Image (cartoon, rainbow, N blue to C red):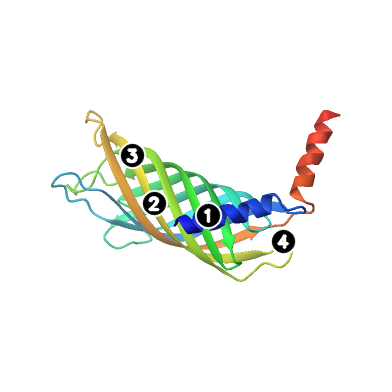
């Protein structure tokens, strides 16, 4: 993990400080499969939730190597096997991410923000953690790039594997005690990625805007 982070940082520095490096608009979206669960407390038996969800991200890509984006993940979870209808609980992560494409085929990213858990099913299942919880969340992802965009406005596809953890607080009932809980999740995604190179070097554009503001 440390080696991957070091390579991502090194690649980012090379892109950010290389003359002529171009930045372009980044957008990625696609379906995900994820399972998540609370860490049990004492003798508690907490279930696993599985669900088919969605990931959206938008931001900038520098040289199609280093990405910075706002991120949204949504997973409707079902007890037991995932289904396309209904949900017993949902898991949402809103925040930001940075990522790097390594050797044109591999991808590594880290992200963080706020995680939200909502128990949709509030009765009939004693083992379900009820109520609404939220708190800081972090995650990491590795993936493989399928196909390489060659023009300025082309797209590619990535297969990604995710792992996340959230430290949340909330109440299971309106008058219940505040609880501190931990949620762990693991998932796989199939993302369509669009990142244009733009029409000019990004640092020239930024510098030009700065100079224009002085006039």
Which label's residue is closer to the chain start, 3 or 4?
4
Residue at image coords 78%, 35%: 210
The residue closer to the viewer here, 119 or 188, is 188
The residue that mark 1 highlights is 6
Q: Are marks 3 and 2 in contact (CB under 8 Å)?
A: no
Q: Earlier in the sequence, mark 2 or mark 1?
A: 1
Q: Is residue 153 left or right of residue 51?
A: right
- In the rendering, at what x and y percent does residue 127 appear? 18, 48
Mark 3 touches mark 1? (CB < 8 Å) = no
Q: Quadrant of residue 177?
A: top left
Mark 1 closeness class: few <14, some 14–19, many ≥20 residues within 10 Å:
few
Q: In the drawing, what numbered circle is on residue 164?
A: 2
Task: Provide residue 35's location: percent of width, then percent of height.
Answer: 34, 57
Assign a secondary structure to mark 4: loop
The residue beneath circle 3 is: 168
Residue farthest toward the right in the current orientation of the protein: 215
Q: Is residue 110 above or below residue 174?
A: below
Quadrant of the image for the N terminus? bottom left
Question: Which type of secondary structure does the marked residue at label 1 adopt?
Answer: helix
Q: CA distance from mark 2 to mark 1?
A: 20 Å
Tag 4 residue = 153
Give the CA separation, mark 4 to mark 2.
32 Å
Percent across and percent down for residue 44 are 16, 47
Q: Horizontally, is 24 left or right of 124 in the view? A: right
Give the mark, 4 or 2, whose residue is nearer the N terminus: 4
- Residue in the foreground of this view, choosing between 141 and 57: 141
Instruction: Report if residue 149 is visible in the image.
Output: yes
């Amino acid at each position: 993990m440390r080696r991957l982070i070091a390579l991502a940082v090194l690649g980012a520095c090379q892109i950010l400080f290389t003359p002529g490096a171009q930045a372009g608009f980044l957008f990625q979206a696609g379906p995900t499969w994820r399972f998540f669960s609370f860490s049990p407390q004492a003798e508690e038996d907490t279930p696993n939730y599985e669900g088919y969800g969605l990931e959206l991200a938008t931001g900038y890509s520098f040289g199609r190597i280093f990405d910075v984006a706002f991120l949204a993940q949504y997973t409707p979870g079902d007890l037991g096997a995932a289904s396309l209808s209904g949900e017993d609980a949902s898991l949402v992560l809103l925040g930001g991410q940075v990522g790097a494409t390594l050797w044109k085929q591999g991808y590594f990213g880290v992200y963080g923000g706020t995680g939200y858990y909502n128990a949709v099913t509030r009765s009939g299942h004693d083992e379900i953690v009820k109520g609404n919880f939220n708190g800081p969340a972090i995650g990491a992802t590795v993936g493989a790039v399928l196909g390489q965009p060659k023009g300025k406005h082309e797209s590619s596809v990535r297969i990604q594997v995710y792992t996340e953890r959230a430290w949340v607080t909330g109440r299971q009932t309106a008058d219940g005690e505040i609880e501190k809980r931990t949620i762990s999740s693991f998932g796989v995604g199939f993302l369509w990625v669009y990142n244009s190179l733009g029409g000019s070097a990004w640092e020239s554009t930024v510098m030009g805007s700065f100079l224009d503001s002085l006039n």
